[in-house]
């Protein structure tokens, strides 16, 4: 009976904790980050590279993780990442965050390139998209021409295109790969760009800012979106659709609804969303939220 008599106080503590978390940068009850919370002194996407592995008061709790895997969605948080050498890459460790084993038709992984590292090629008929999170990466294409990619830069490589990514110092990238869905008389071209070069697009009925990093034309069977939310902004549409998503939260924190569950999320978290899973996001905290989102497009779901 003592437990039930104490329940109102426990419930009140949880509510107070949640309210405090909304007003704190970390978004967890009295939680302190293991990295400096002063974002003004940190490079872009620093919390993806040096994430808060767990709320401070739970770091000593054995087995704790915010990661969740369900049949129609997954939340993969940094304390769950398992890095191992990437096949055919040199001096590079990778952590797969999304793969067909969970029901996806693409892979998404973080690659940590060390000094003098080189990439391997994806399998035959597989296209690749690379986004730089930290450091400098040099892309060399089949012609031998090299291009330097900095943070917030990206490259798309069509299937079966010869290319090489190199890093002479440490660098971190996020990579998307999928088997290309060929369409007669349409061939994708390689693309190199940066986020700030892409225009803001109209989002009727929504308040977030949207950039698309790849062309919307038929040769491309997926796109990568950059979406920015100011604190307090949220998705107006409660989305349910046939497209799959792979998401990496680059900045900020908020609440993500996936199916019937609600998850606190912060920079460094990755999400997989299966077709038709209900999904919704609201930004919390004191700084903007930015996430990178994979979405399959331009193909009949049959």
Image (spheres, rainbow, N blue to C red):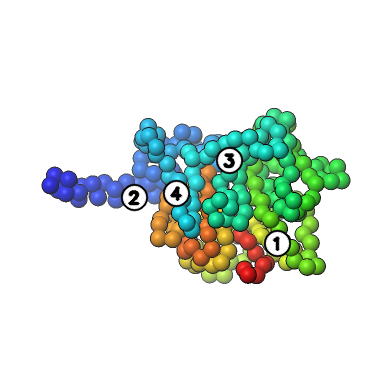
Q: Earlier in the sequence, mark 4 or mark 3?
A: 4
Examine the rendered structure and indicate whether residue 39 appears above or below residue 234.
Answer: above
Looking at the image, which is closer to me, 240 or 287?
A: 240
Q: What residue is shown with label 2?
A: 19
Q: Position of residue 242 (x, y in %)?
A: 56, 66
Please state if 61 lies on the left or on the right of 89 as rendered. Answer: left
Given this view, does label 2 or label 4 mark the residue nearer the observer? 4
Which residue is rendered at x = 47% and y = 56% of the image?
71
Q: Secondary structure at mark 3?
A: strand
User: Can residue 20 be seen from the camera position used here?
Assistant: yes
Labels 2 & 1 near each other (Cβ < 8 A): no
Q: Is residue 210 left or right of residue 35?
A: right
Picture disc at residue 220: none
Q: How many discs mark residues in the rendered view?
A: 4
The CA distance from mark 4 to mark 1 is 30 Å
Mark 1–mark 3 Cα distance, whole angstroms, equals: 25 Å
Residue corresponding to mark 4? 68
Of the residues under marks 4 and 1, which one precedes in the sequence? 4
Residue 181 disc label? 1
- Of the image marks 2 and 1, the number of the one nearer the N terminus: 2
Q: How far across and down, in percent of the image, does residue 275 sit?
A: 54, 63
Please name the residue shown 45% across and 46% down the image: 67
Could you give the CA–CA distance between mark 4 and mark 3, rounded to whole angstroms?
16 Å
Q: From mark 3 to mark 2, how far is it between C-alphas? A: 34 Å
Estimate the spatial distance between the alpha carbons at disc 2 and disc 1, rounded to whole Å.
46 Å
Q: Report helix, strand or loop for mark 1.
A: loop
């Amino acid at each position: 009976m003592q437990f039930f008599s104490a329940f109102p106080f426990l419930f009140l503590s949880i509510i107070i904790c949640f309210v405090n978390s909304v007003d704190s940068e970390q978004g967890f009850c009295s939680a302190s980050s293991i990295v400096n919370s002063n974002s003004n002194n940190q490079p872009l996407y620093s919390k993806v590279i040096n994430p808060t592995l767990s709320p401070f008061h739970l770091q000593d709790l054995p087995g704790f993780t915010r990661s969740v895997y369900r049949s129609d969605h997954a939340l993969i948080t940094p304390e769950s990442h398992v890095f191992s050498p990437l096949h055919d890459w040199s001096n590079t460790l990778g952590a797969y965050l999304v793969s067909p084993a969970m029901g996806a038709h693409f892979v998404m992984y973080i690659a940590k390139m060390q000094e003098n590292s080189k990439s391997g090629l994806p399998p035959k008929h597989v296209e690749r998209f690379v986004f730089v999170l930290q450091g400098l990466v040099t892309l060399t294409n089949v012609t031998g021409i090299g291009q330097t990619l900095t943070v917030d830069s990206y490259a798309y490589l069509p299937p079966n295109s010869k290319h090489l990514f190199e890093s002479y110092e440490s660098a971190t990238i996020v990579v998307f790969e999928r088997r290309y869905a060929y369409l007669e008389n349409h061939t994708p071209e390689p693309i190199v760009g940066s986020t700030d070069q892409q225009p803001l697009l109209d989002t009727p009925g929504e308040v977030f800012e949207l950039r698309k990093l790849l062309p919307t034309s038929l040769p491309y069977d997926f796109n990568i979106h950059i979406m920015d939310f100011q604190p307090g902004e949220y998705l107006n549409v409660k989305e349910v659709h046939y497209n799959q998503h792979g998401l990496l939260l680059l900045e900020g924190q908020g609440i993500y609804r996936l199916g019937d569950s609600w998850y606190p999320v912060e920079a460094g978290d990755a999400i997989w969303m299966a077709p038709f899973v209900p999904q919704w996001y609201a930004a919390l905290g004191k700084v903007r939220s930015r996430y990178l989102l994979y979405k399959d497009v331009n193909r009949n779901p049959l």
